[in-house]
């Protein structure tokens, strides 16, 4: 009930203003994230990637790009948190307006474009936080870095965050950075992952710990691309895949006033497409490879469907915005059962 009142007020603002206000509130007053919003946290420990997750429900990258609200997310009962996408240098992202609600469909369209304050700012927030759970840091390239030098940005990001992240996610699937999804194509992907994996080994030797590497992929890849991604991940020692990012498809929202807005669609209309990608990945990578399911989870049954499709862990974003913090406990409790 309390969240419904808060949401009603926030939804009177445009989507990005409401997002920024929420982040600012949680940053300055983490105690706002109380049990009155979320209910009791669910303890359902699971060992994956050499890490101990408090439960199987995590916060997806994209909501807290700069790692400013870690203490609040822990209070809300997430089993793990992924922050970013962060780039080596700060960047403003794409021109506004760039985020649109489709409430009739439980969906969002965004073309934010990796707007963030840069990796050094993010790491300062991580260091000052009291958060001690599993922390993923999602890295990407700056928009003005030529694609021919994209790997340099990923290597810079990896070097910066490796010592501070429980795991590192390589984001090659946002539709809002020009040509970024080209990195999912076989030749470019193998070149990128080979260099990232080699650098991870250098860092592991130097720091005495080897952070797991995950790759986040799009829901718009073909069957052949999925096979290539699975093979590349296995070949280069990647530890897991996150399926999926937002979609360029507008299936399920045709005719909506915002349907023609450029950007990635998330939320309920993405669910079937994301689940299909997840199922196909599971057949390609086998049973012993970690998959994280994200996209279209608006209920505990949606989280259960992700598990049935092959996910070891799930992440929330758009459903969390529409349904509120109670969704975290509901999903975690159902998955535990």
Image: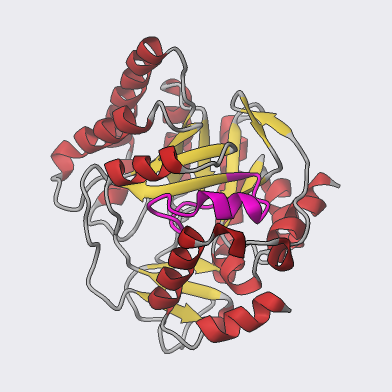
Q: Quadrant of residue 150?
A: top left
Between 168 and 191, the residue placed more toward the observer is 168
Colour scheme shown: secondary structure
How far across and down, in percent of the image, does residue 311 sit? 65, 43
Extreme right residue here? 337
Q: Quadrant of residue 215?
A: top left
> x, y percentage for residue 279?
62, 46
Of residues 219 and 111, the one drawn nearer to the viewer in this rendering: 111
Near-viewer residue (132 or 203): 132
Q: Is residue 235 visible?
A: yes
Instruction: Classify 279 as above or below 316.
Output: above
Residue 309 is covered by the magenta coloring: no
Residue stretch rendered in magenta on the structure: 60-80
Q: How many marks on residues?
A: 0
Viewer can see residue 276: no
Residue appearing at x 56%, y 56% in the figure: 274
Instruction: State the residue at coordinates (33%, 36%).
Output: 186
The location of residue 272, given as percent across then percent down, is: 61, 62
Which residue corresponds to the image point at 28% horizontal and 24% vertical from the top-left? Answer: 195
| Quadrant holding the N terminus | bottom right
Q: Is residue 335 above or below residue 35?
A: above
Q: Tell whether 318 sits left or right of 116.
A: right
Tell me the chief SS of the magenta region.
Answer: loop
Residue placed at 26% from the left, 56% from the top?
177
In the rendered image, residue 7, in percent from the top left (x then y), is placed at 59, 79
Q: Residue 76 colored magenta?
A: yes
């Amino acid at each position: 009930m309390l969240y419904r009142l808060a949401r009603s007020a926030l939804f009177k603002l445009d989507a990005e203003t409401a997002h920024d206000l929420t982040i600012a509130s949680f940053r300055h007053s983490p105690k706002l994230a109380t049990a009155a919003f979320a209910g009791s946290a669910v303890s359902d420990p699971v060992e994956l990637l050499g890490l101990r997750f408090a439960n199987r429900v995590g916060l997806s990258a994209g909501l807290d790009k700069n790692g400013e609200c870690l203490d609040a997310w822990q209070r809300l009962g997430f089993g793990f948190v992924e922050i970013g996408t962060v780039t080596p240098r700060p960047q403003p992202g794409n021109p506004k307006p760039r985020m649109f609600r489709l409430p009739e469909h439980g969906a969002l369209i965004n073309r934010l474009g990796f707007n963030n304050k840069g990796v050094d700012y993010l790491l300062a927030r991580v260091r000052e936080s009291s958060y001690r759970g599993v922390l993923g840091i999602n890295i990407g390239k700056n928009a003005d870095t030529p694609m021919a030098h994209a790997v340099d940005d990923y290597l810079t990001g990896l070097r910066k965050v490796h010592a501070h992240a429980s795991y590192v996610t390589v984001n090659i699937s946002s539709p809002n950075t020009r040509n970024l999804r080209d990195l999912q194509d076989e030749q470019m992907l193998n070149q990128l992952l080979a260099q990232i994996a080699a650098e991870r080994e250098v860092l592991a030797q130097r720091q005495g710990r080897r952070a797991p590497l995950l790759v986040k992929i799009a829901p718009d890849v073909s069957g052949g691309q999925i096979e290539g991604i699975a093979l590349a991940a296995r070949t280069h020692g990647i530890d897991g895949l996150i399926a999926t990012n937002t979609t360029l498809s507008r299936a399920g929202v045709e005719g909506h006033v915002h349907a023609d807005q450029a950007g990635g669609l998330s939320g309920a209309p993405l669910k079937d497409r994301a689940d299909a990608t997840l199922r196909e990945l599971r057949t390609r990578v086998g049973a012993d490879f970690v998959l994280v399911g994200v996209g279209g989870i608006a209920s505990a049954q949606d989280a259960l469907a992700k598990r049935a499709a092959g996910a070891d862990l799930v992440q929330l974003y758009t459903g969390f915005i529409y349904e509120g913090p109670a969704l975290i406990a509901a999903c975690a409790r159902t998955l535990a059962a």
